[in-house]
Each structure stands twice: as C-alpha cells, then as structure tokens.
Amino acid sequence: MAAELLLKLVVGLCFWAVFWLGGAATVSTNAGGEAAAAAVVDGRSAIAVTDEDFVCTTLDWWPPDKCDYGTCSWGLATLLNMDLSNKILLNAVKAFSPLKLRLGGSLQDVLIYDTGDPRQPCTPFTKNSSAMFGFTQGCLPLHRWDELNAFFQKSGAKIIFGLNALNGRVPMSDGSLGGPWNYTNAASFIRYTVSKGYDIHGWELGNELSGSGVGARVDADQYAQDVLALKQIIDSSYQGHASKPLVIAPGGFFDAAWFTELISRTKPNQMDVMTHHIYNLGPGVDTHLIDKILDPSYLDGEAGTFSSLQGILKSAGTSTVAWVGEAGGAYNSGHHLVTDAFVFSFWYLDQLGMSSKYDTKTYCRQTLIGGNYGLLNTTTFEPNPDYYSALLWNRLMGTKVLSTTFNGTNKIRAYAHCARDSGGITLLLINLSGNNTNHIYVTSEGVQPYSTKEEGRRRFGRVPGLGKEAQLIREEYHLTPKDGSLQSQHVVLNGNVLAPDANGEIPKLEPVQVEGTQPITVAPYSIVFAHIPSFYAPACRVIVGERQSMLTCCKMK
C-alpha cells in the first residue's frame, strides 16, 4: 500500500511539473531589459541524428623523420612507435567511454602486414625522396599489432582500420592506377585479427585515392569493385559471428561525381559508411590560419560539402551513412601554436556542430597524438585545448541535432543538441570576436516565451506539492585561453586551468550553476556549453510507457 501511495504521489507531482513547465521555453534577458541577441532553438523535432560515439580521432603511421617546412613534428607518437604504457594516453582514451580511433593516413597505402609471406619481408619505412610521400614501403609487425590491441582493449577504444588499397595496381594511360585490388595480404591480416579475437569496428579501404587523389588515384568504377571484394572478405572472415565490422570507403576528399558513382555501384547495402577528409584551411605553413579560423564566412564555406554529400546519399536510396574520416584543418601536419592551441577549438567545435547538422554520423579528428594538430602533446602526452573541447562535446551533446539560429552578430556560432543522458538541451556558443561580450537569450521556435525575470518566477516559482521554490538552474562550461592568449596550449574552464594530475588522471570538468532567468554571458574569444534541463523540447523526450514517461519527467526536473 505504501509503495502504491508513493507511486501516485510521484506521478501526481510529475503531472503538475508537466502542466506548469511543459510549455515553457528557457529565456534570458539582460539586466537592463533592453533588447539582446537570441539563440532560437526548435526543439519540436530533430533535424539530424549522430552516432552515440560521434567524436572520433585518428592515429597515423609516420616515422620520426617525417618533416614539413623544415619541422619534424611527429616524433615517437604514431602507431609504430608511441609509448602505449603512458598513463595520460590511456586515461585520455578511457575518458570518452568509448572513443573511436581511426588507424590510417597517407602511408597506409604503402603499408604491408607481416603475415608470414616470405616474398614480402617486414622492413620499416625508410626515407626516400623519390617515393610517394617520401618513404619506401613499410610494414606492421604482428607483435606490434598485438601490443596495439592490448592497449585498445584496456582503453575501451573502438577501432577503424585503414587498409592498403594500392596493392596490385598498375599505371593507366590517364595517370590513374588501375587493375583490381590485390587483397591477399589484407585478407590474411583480417583473418589473423579475427583469429586473435581482436574487436574491429570497421575496415576502411584506402586513403585519399578518390577524385583527383593525393599521390595516386583510382577510378570510382574500379574502387566500387574493390569495395565489394572487401565486403566479401569480411563476410567470409566473420562468418558465424554475431556482428560484423563496418565496410568503409573511400577515405578521400569529396568529389561529387566520383562519390556519386561509388555509391551507385555499391548500393543498397554493400558499403556501410562513406568517409571524406577535410583540410579546408590550406597548408600548415599558411601565415593566415588564425584569420581564417576567426572569419565566419570562411568557416561557412565547408557547409557546401556536407550538404552535397547528404544530398547524394539521400537521393541514392542507400543505407550508407556519412562520416568525416580525417580532419586536421591545415594539411602537412598543421601549424604549431595554431592547430594545437586554444584558437583551434573555434574551428574544431564549429566543424562538429556544422557537420552534425547535415547528418554526419561520426567525425574523426586528425590526430589523437602526432603532428601539430594532435589532441595530446606529441612529447608529454598532456592534453591540448581541443582535447577538452572534444570531451565536453562527448559528455554534453546528445545524438539528436536541433535546428538553431542566432539573430545577432555573425561572430557568434550557435549549435544545439538534445542533452546527453539528461533532460533538456545543450547549447554550444562560440564567440569569434575578441572585443564584444554577448548576453544571450535562449528561446524556442514555436513556443511563446515569457519576457521578464518576474514573470518567469511567477510561472515557475512553485510547483504544487513540492512545498518550496523550484529554481530554474542551468549548468555552464566557459572555456577561455590561459592568460588570454589565443595561441596558448592551456585552456581555462570556469576560471580553472585544466591539466592531468600527478597520476595522469584527466581532470574533472565541473560546471558553474546559473539561475535560468539570467542571460548566458559569452566573453570575447570564448566558448560556452550550456546545459539547460528545463528547456521544453519534445524531440528530446524518450517515452517508454506512461509510467516510465512520468518518472523520466520528474528525474529531468
């Protein structure tokens, strides 16, 4: 009887909570009451849905003597040589629970696997200026693959492996490489991986061979045949397994005609994921990288690629989805104190927000570690600012993407998702201006908002049966550069510099609590994640029967 009375009380309280709070939009005003800019979020339905593990990073194959513009920035931070026992590295990956890791890069198409073929000795990459990308063919020893998988299992990472797609190719008259893919070595490597019980989330064919290619190119017709061959290898190798890895391709730069032909020849369900790469800021040596990052019109330029690929997949009638398979912003290893500094979080988070609006399911950042664009420092393994930006996104932004517009300055970039694992929404605000502090309303499309703090208190101040005021509280995470320098490699969260502790543990990311009727204050050159649990967003509800719906309601409040 007592249990029944308690359940009735809970349901009754939730009914009143829905009645009083259900139609509300969370709105802020500035203290003076004058007009302020507004972020308008349409919470009625999602415009796109991402993977749960949307955030992905890459690991590359470069030897230490890989150099760009006279600087050798890779060191011992790649798949063949990095210290897998480093505590920060392990904790940095574990913090995402899980983190997708895409293993690949330029050298993957000249990498063989040491599966015991005496005709292919396992020799390391050697510098050779006449070879593609400046290195001879290299090899992955199986003992290193075993070591890597021990790390992946311990860290909980989900692995996407990029296979060598150039084996067996011959030069064609048009300058491309033709002939069928010789998959003998790759198939042997896949079978070894299966025999060891290593968990692979997806096998990706080739790196930057699409369209005009980078270093080499393969026609879409031939590439499609090779994707079908990979599909057959996976089906055969994983026969009897409960699930099979994803078939992924082509891992190259977007070319509308090439991608359209590939998808048409692999539909409806022979290829699971179509990946493309992004280096829209140009070469790492460019001295105007920061100007580009802070230019809203320049950032907007990449939207055309996302939109075009989304259109191709929709019109093809295929189950294939889009990923960004590699994105470092500035190619040739990035630029020290730009792509590994606070300023790059403006570009990176804007890319995450923009790509998700166009139904991109996963976004792989180049790199987790290595080069000048790693989320971790190449030498110390300590997180660069973008690591914390990625971790906050992973923990706060749910899979459902909401249409969001901002009616003020174009220097504010605004994105909203249903909140992850909690009620309401999470709003991301990026201030590209170094001069202006913005006080921002948050309101919802299609819902009549209240307009003053007093009215908000009258409407929300008391919920019948709760006995005292129920405050509208939101959680805010303000990111700023240490000492105000955009090129700082340390980030400040709500006034505290973030860094691992002496044991290599990733610091807690603690919010500040703000009364919901106050504006969101976005300082110059800053980034704000705001979790607004009271925001009325039907798109974010998860209803599993009436009782669960009611209990979820109360939990959210």
Image (cartoon, rainbow, N blue to C red):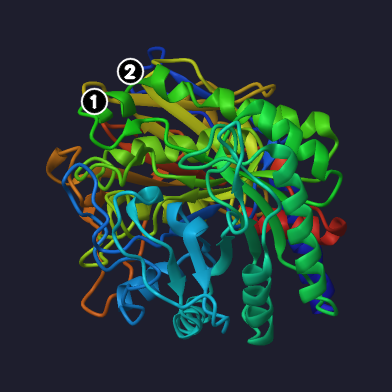
Picture coordinates of residue 502, whole percent (x, y): 21, 77
Hey, what amino acid is under mark 1? His
> Looking at the image, is mark 2 or mark 1 nearer the viewer?
1
> Residue 471, relative to residue 93: is it above or below?
above
Residue 319 visible in this rendered orientation of the protein:
yes
Count neighbours of disc 1 (C-alpha within 10 A) and say few if under 14, some if 14 to 19, many if 20 or more. few
Which residue occupies the foreground of this view, 476 or 313? 313
Return the disc, 2 or 1, that comes first in the chain's sequence: 2
Residue 285 quadrant = top left
| Residue depicted at 20% across the width and 28% down the height | 287
Q: Inspect the image, locate mark 2, and give the three-letter code of the amino acid beneath it.
A: Gly
Q: Is residue 138 above or below residue 550?
A: below
Residue located beneath label 2 in the image: 32
Say which residue appears at 24% left-offset and 30% top-offset.
286
Residue 419 x %, y % = 58, 48
Residue at far front of view: 173
Vertical position of residue 231 compared to residue 401: above or below:
below
Q: Quadrant of the N terminus?
A: bottom right
- Which label is found at residue 537? none
Name the residue nearer the viewer: 454 or 163: 163
* Residue bearing mark 1: 288
Total numbered badges shown on the rendered structure: 2
Q: CA distance from mark 2 to mark 1?
A: 39 Å
Element marked by disc 2 = loop
Q: Is residue 27 left or right of residue 262?
A: left
Q: Nearer the viewer, residue 316 or 87?
A: 316
Q: In the rendered view, does 85 fall on the left or right side of 245?
A: left
* Nearer to me, 525 or 38: 525
Vertically, is 510 above or below 457?
A: below
Q: Is residue 369 left or right of residue 104?
A: left
